[in-house]
Amino acid sequence: MAETKKTQQTAYDPWKDMRDIVVPKKRNGDQECIHCSVNGRIFMVPCTGRVQKVPRPIYEVLIHSQEMRDEAERRAEQTTKRMHASEKAVNLA
């Protein structure tokens, strides 16, 4: 009688998929850790400026957060430049 081997597939668990991320060091007045919550799981990621391993869902939230912060800074710069340009135009008139 031949034995049949069953392949046991394990479901992908994103919480076990660890990713490397660097959270910048804190500046004056910043928090020492970034609090991040996904589906009721709360993580506190220290702002050390070093590479840290975090689960994939936390990694994605932190990356998205940084992208949105960068976009907000870019838009703030554009708005400031436009305001200065319009002030110069008014002063020249």
Image (tube, rainbow, N blue to C red):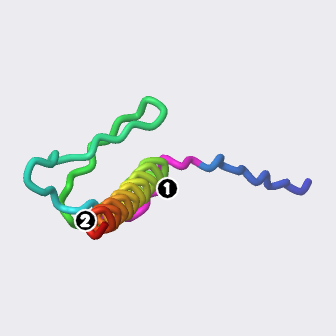
User: Looking at this rendering, what residue extends furthest in the right direction?
Assistant: 1
Of marks 2 and 1, the one in the foreground: 2
Q: Is residue 56 left or right of residue 49?
A: right
Q: Residues within 10 Å of mark 2 (few under 14, many from 20)?
A: few
- Marks 1 and 2: in contact by CB < 8 Å? no
Measured as percent of width and height from the top left, residue 51 is found at: 28, 67
Q: Residue at x 54, y 49 (%)?
A: 14
Amino acid type at image mark 2: Asn
Q: Nearer the viewer, residue 56 or 35?
A: 35
State the extent of the magenta-drawn residues as a range.
Answer: 13-22
Q: Of marks 2 and 1, which one's residue comes earlier in the chain?
A: 1
Q: Which residue is mark 1?
A: 17
Q: Which residue is mark 2?
A: 91
User: Looking at this rendering, what residue extends furthest in the top direction?
Assistant: 40
Q: Is residue 55 magenta?
A: no
| Quarter holding residue 37 | top left
